[in-house]
Each structure stands twice: as structure tokens, then as C-alpha cells.
Amino acid sequence: MNAPVEIHEEGASARRPLLEIRDLAISFKTSGGEVNAVRNAHLTVMPGETVAIVGESGSGKSTTALAAIGLLPSNGRVSGGQILFDGEDISHASEKRMIELRGNSIGMVPQDPMSNLNPVWKIGYQVRETLKANGLPDSADDVAKVLSEAGLPDAARRAKQYPHEFSGGMRQRALIAIGLSCQPRLLIADEPTSALDVTVQRQILDHLDKMTTELGTAVLLITHDLGLAAERADKVVVMYRGQVVEAGPSLELLQNPQHPYTKRLVASAPSLASRRIQAAKELGIESEDLLAPDEDVVVASSMPDEVLQIENLRKVFKLRSGLGRSTDFTAVDDVSFSVKRGTTTAIVGESGSGKSTVAQMVLNLLAPTSGKIIFDGVDTSTLNSKEIFAFRRRVQPIFQDPYGSLDPMYNIFRTIEEPLRTHKIGDKASREKKVRELLDQVALPQSTMQRYPNELSGGQRQRVAIARALALDPEVIICDEAVSALDVLVQAQVLNLLAELQSRLGLTYLFITHDLAVVRQIADHVCVMERGKLVETGSTDDVFDSPQQEYTKALLNAIPGAGLMLPPEVA
Amino acid sequence: MSTYILKRFLQLIPVFLGATLLVYFLVFSLPGDPIVALFGDKPVNEAVAAKLRIQYHLDQPFWMQYLLYLKSIFTFDLGQDFSGRPIAAVLGEVFPVTARLAVMALVFEAVFGIIFGLIAGLRKGKFFDATVLVASLIVIGIPIFVLGFLLQFTIGVQLGWAKPTVSSAATVQDLILPAIVLGLGSFAYVLRLTRTSVIENMSADYVRTATAKGLSRFRVVRVHILRNSLIPVITFLGADLGALMGGAIVTEGIFNVPGVGNRLYRAVLSGEGPTVVSIVTVLVLIYCLSNLLVDLLYAWLDPRIRYDS
């Protein structure tokens, strides 16, 4: 990963590519017969070069990369084409040959640091077996060296710990250490940082950059984030539905996308997006390409009263540290802000900043240690159980994980109807009518009612979660990382849907997220939290244009692709 | 960790008291007079019967009987069974036999269950897997007394590969066939549990990462699939040890093993309260201890589990 643009135009013919994928086709055996996951894929990685494959999930980008290291799932096979590694076709190489190549010729850094380290073995052990398997010296010192090179402080001691004693960023460093420990010539990095906070993401990517540059390692970077790809790679390959639709030098491709899919991707990349939705709202128009319906917009912003006031909110958790002893951990420290009706306020911060704790307290799921949450003029801590029931009707959550927050045993109708039944609203017929309306509102077909969550995609499930939240006609919706688990295009759709519902129904959103790019698209006001404290508040424009705090600046700088300007005149 | 173990041992006290009280009460409420039953068909000699009643405290009310029994436990004098032998000696005789049988059954089900389960899991959907799955289902489906008689007849009587019944010495050799019968049901469960667990782990991300590191297939299976897959299996096996000890009644009956099950069955029939309670109490303690062992093993196998805090 080095300076972009200096593409090996002349050198390309002289030097042999390290990895060359020609006409690659990969198919999967499923119950419904063979399914082609990848067709006619082409790509070339020169020694020392960084190439990014970009696409949404299911585009075949990971499948292509896994085929290059011989790790296709057991029901998948290369059904055509060639994978040339340093001139040798490895698309049908024996397992023995692949074991020789893996580790010391082709390394891998996987996507999810939480699940890619074996929880029952110490970190050091997992590094050591890599060295051993590839015939390298594997003493405790060698292990510590590998780990410290990957940026793990205090590596010798850390090597004796188990994965669960590591943070996500630490684990990813350990995985990078493992991936690079045998100095491979090609490193496959499959979404290496998508599970991490932005600031950690930046550190990790910077470090990966530095290491691969020092070692002269070529990198095949798989990512769904075009901004990240453009910033880190020399060349970008765009995949869509199993095919390579466009490829070229990063900046060129970004500034002048040819294929319609690439254009869409560029337009919706959150890290590159300008204030599209916001701008549309200010102008009072809903442009068609934002999925808005044709009906007239009810502007709800004419009620500027403060629906939610948070005053000096504090939450202290008691952490047990041995028998009978405990230490206090202040998760939320003296946080005050207010939310105007019909607006969107975003709370941003890294994991552990206390933003989700605030959300839980606002939802009345967690009692504050001190401070007040005033909803519509009433302190929520004074509510009795009956009033809390009524409060719940007016304040609804949408959670991060659409896979986890829908009951797999309930069909969609029952899922959306449940709050209505719980609150004894209407009879059977009217409830069914309401569910149909809600599905319409979130742009899901009514046939969805009879389906189960596992039959829906992530974006559809999140729409169901939104429909369920809307069922009781709430005034405030708390979105706790509501779009973080979604692909960029789906994310854009869901954000547009939320924006549209807000203008139509006058909803108030409290948006909890770690993703500043999302904040810019949806929020009117931003509250930045760091270690339990509110460090900066202001309108979204102010915070983005002139951040006051160092922490906010760091967060903003960490957005991948933030430094890449896309002047329209260039495009 | 030591605090945790101490706590667990302290928990044994109420379990012990509760179990003895419950079992004692159940035996006490059995219908019929055990002393009268001792005379069989002969006329009851009232003087002898009265003497026996006093000797076994049967003239006392329930609470008194129970307290006297507790006292006898803590003075290490468990009294005598109806044939006049000290109960402690009876326990010392039957428990080693059953323990040998149970451990043999456990080794059988663990070794074969894990090996077969591992192979079936690694070859999911192939011939071996399908065969083993159907076979294990049949084993689970057939009651143990049918399987016991079947194996006793074919292997013991017809083929003569093993002795059909067990001698009074109950040597390891004698116990091979009974141990297989006893372990057969759990063997099928261990196999299926291992298979499922292996299949689940095979698709785990860390297994793919391990392969990507350049490890050999053998090492990936042994270090990354097998150990992780064994966590639920070990839990099952530990709990099963207690079940095997107490659940050997049918098997011991079929093969005439002079073990706990046989003796317990006779004691229940003749209403020998102290004998029944003594045997059951030891079984309860074994059960509790094997569960403690499982919990400790669990922490050893899975470092994420810690009992300190």
C-alpha cells in the first residue's frame, strides 16, 4: 500500500504479476443445483502492489480472494479459469501444495477479529504454531518479536494471554501479526478492519501499510468501503454479482466511474457522501433518487419544543474485583443535552464511550445513578409501572443487529403485530390492516407478512425492525447502531427511509452510532462522547466543518477516504 | 479457584442432608413390614421380631430413626444389614465392582464415541457418517435390557467371545461385555454430540484462519477442531459417570454383576432402610463430585470460563 497513481504502466509488461486471475469462475453446490458465485473474474496484482476488490456482500469479492488461498467452503469449487500465483496455476493445486504456499507465500488477515482466533489457545501459541508450520524459528522471543512488530505493546506478556483478554483492535493486531509472521509475498486482507472503531481502524490500516511497504508485500484488500479502498490501494477492482464490472487506478475510477454500479457505489459510499439527505431536507425537496414517494411532504419541523432533555446524567457500574470488593466504573459522566421534536440528534463515540448506556437509560431500560431524563416535560424516573407502559409506547428502539433483535420463531406479521397486541390496540382486523400499512411505509411487499426473519436479507430485516418500532406511532425512536450492520447501499436505503419517515410523521430520532459518515447523512445535531463524557455538541455542520475538540478531529480524520476530495469538476 | 472449590464442597452438606432425608422417608413409607417379610413363609416369632425391631430402631418414630441413622454415619458405624453383615463392609464390596464397571463403560463410550463422532463429523454427509448416524439412532432406540440380552446371547453364548455372566470376583475381563452394554447408550450420545460439535467447529472462522496459516490438516483437526469440540462432550461424560454408577441396575441384573445395582435392588425389595440410604447417599455424593469435576474440567478446557469472581 503506497502512494496511489504511480501505477506500473510500463513496468507491467516487464515484470511478472504475483497474482493473476484469469476468467475465474467459481460455483457452489446448493440444494437447488450449482450456483455460479463468480464469473469471468480478472485481476492482476504486481509484486508489492496493493489492489482492492470492492463490492457489496454477495458480490463474490471474498469468494474470489478465498479461492486464491485455496480456502473455498467445501461446497464451492473453481469451475473455470486460472489463478496464477507467480506463474503457477494454483486453481486446482493439491492440498499439499496449498499447505506449502499458505503462510509463507500467501498470508491472510481475516475479517472478524472476534471469531478468528481460537478462544481456547493463548495468543502466543497461535502465533508460534504458524512459525513452526512454516519452518521458522519459534522461540518465545520470536513470537514476541512478531507480535510487537504488529504494534502490540508489551508483547512478551501479552503472548501469554487468551483472545478474550484482548480488545478487538488488539486481536486484529494479533491476526495481522499471524498473517505477516512468515513474510508472505501476497497478503489477502479480507475486510481487515470493518469490525473496528474508526480511530482503531485507521491505526491498524496505517500499521498494515507500513509493514507491507517495509516487507514489500503485495496486498489484496477486500472491502465494501470504496473510500477505504481508494485511500489504501493502488488499483481498485469493482465486483458486482460475481463479475468484475470495472477496474483501474483508484483515484481515476473514483472520479470517473463508468459502470452504473460503480456510479451508485461512489454516490452512496458513506465516507465520501456529502450532506445529501440533509441538503434535500433543507431545500424542502425530496429527490426521487433518494427513494422518496411522490406524495406531499408534511413538514414537521414547525414544532420546535424539546421533547427530550437529559440533565447531568450519570451512570456508575460496580465492577466486582474479587470477593466482596468492587470498584466503580463511571460509564456515563455528567451528560446533558436536549433533543428538539422532529429533529435527529446523533451521539457518536467509540465503543466504550458510554453512548449505548445513554440510549438504554433514555429507553428506561437502565436506571441512571443520578441526573434526570425529562421526556415531554416529565421526569421518567418518577413514572410508575403504568406510566412506564405508556412511555414505552411513545419511545421505541431500533437495535443494531437485525439478526438478533427479531424472534426467529415469529413470522413477520406476528413480529410487527406484537406491540399492538401488547398495548391492546384495535381488534384483529384493524391490527392486520395496520401491519399492511406499516409494511407499505417501509417499502416491503405485503407478502412478507407470512415469512420468517431467516428468509429475509439484512436490509429487509432492518425494515421489519423499523416497521415494528413504528407500529405504536411513537414520537421518539432511539436507533442504537441501527445501520451499522448493513452494506453501504442498503445502509443508504435505510437512512433514506428513516429521513423520509421523519419528514412525513414528524418523528424524533436519537441516533447512536460510531460511524461519523452516517451522522453526516442523517443528523441535525451531534453529541460526541469520549469515555463517558460529552466532549462536544453542536449542529452537524458546525461539528464537521470546525470541530473544537482534538478527539472530534481525530474521529473525523479517521473516516476512510475523508482526505480524498472528489471535486465535481474533475469527474 | 480454591474459594470456588471450597464453596462447592460446602454446598455438598445440604445436598447430603436433603438426599438422605428424602430417601430415608421414601423407604420408611414403603408398604409392608420388613421384619415380617424376613420370616418368609414361616410363622412369625413375636419375641424375635420385637428384638429385631429394637435392633434396627424400627420401634422408633420416623424422626428418631433418621437421627439415629445420621448419628451412625458420623460415628462411622453404619450398622448392619438384615443378614447381619456390617453395611460398611457391604459398601466396600459392591462399590469397587460398580466403579470398575462404570469407568470401563465410560472409557469405552469416550474413546469410541469421540473417534467415531470425529470421523463422522469430518466426513459429513458421506457414507461413514450416514451409517454411523443410523446405527447410533438404533442403539438409542432399543432399550438397554434388550441390547443386553442380545449381546449376552450372541457374543457370550453363541460365539463364546466373552463370558456371558460375571464371576463373583468381577475381574476386568469379566466386565468387558457388561461395560459395553452399559456404555452403549451413552456411546451413541457422545458420538452424535461430538459429530455435531465438530461440524459446527469446522465452519468456525478460526479454523479457516488456522488453515490459512499453513498448518497441516492433521494439526488443524487436532488442535483447532478437536479440542474445541470436546468442551460439550466432556461435560456430558462427567455427568454421565454419576449416571452410570447409579444406572447400572439393569445391566448388573442381566450379567449378574455383584455390584451396587444388584445390592440396591435387593435392599429395596426387602425394605432395608439403612442399606438403601447408605448406597443412595454414596451415589448422590459421587454424582455431586463428578459434577464438580466437570465444572473444573470445563474451566480448564475453556479459558474464557473463570470461577474466581
Image (cartoon, helix red, strand yellow):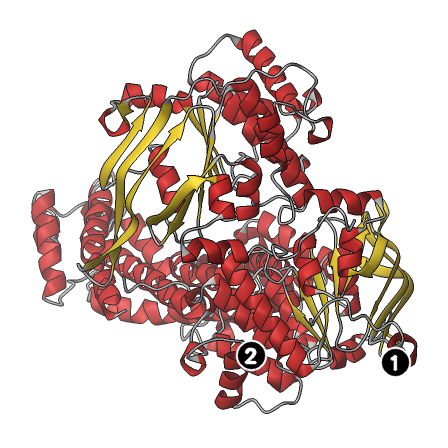
Which residue type carries mark 1? Arg
Q: Residue at x 35, y 22 (%)?
A: A391
Residue B167 at x, y percent in the picture: 45, 72
Specify whether residue B160 is in view. Answer: no
Instruction: Using the rendered view, name the quadrant where residue B184 is placed.
Output: bottom right
- The kind of residue on which mark 2 rests is Val
Q: Position of residue A360 (x, y in %)?
A: 37, 38
- Give the residue pinned by disc 2: A127
Q: Where is residue B301 shown, x and y percent of the image? A: 45, 69
Can you tell which of label 2 and label 1 is closer to the viewer? 1
**The N terminus of chain A lies in quadrant:** bottom right
- Mark 2: secondary structure: helix
Q: Tell me whether circle 2 and circle 1 mark residues in contact (CB < 8 Å).
A: no
Q: Numbered disc 1: what chain? A: A
Q: Is residue B139 above or below residue B31?
A: below
Identify the subunit bearing mark 2. A
Marks 2 and 1, Cα distance to the nearest angstrom?
33 Å
Local crowd at mark 2 within 10 Å, few (<14), some, or many (≥20)?
many
The residue beneath circle 1 is: A15
Secondary structure beneath label 1: loop
Disc 1 residue crowd, few under 14, some 14–19, many 20+, Cα 10 Å:
few
The mark nearer the N terminus, 2 or 1, is 1
Residue A322 found in image quarter: bottom left
- Image quarter of residue B211: bottom right
- Count of number-bearing discs: 2
Foreground pick, A155 / A325: A155
**Which numbered disc covers residue A410?**
none
Horizontal and vertical percent position of residue B300: 40, 70
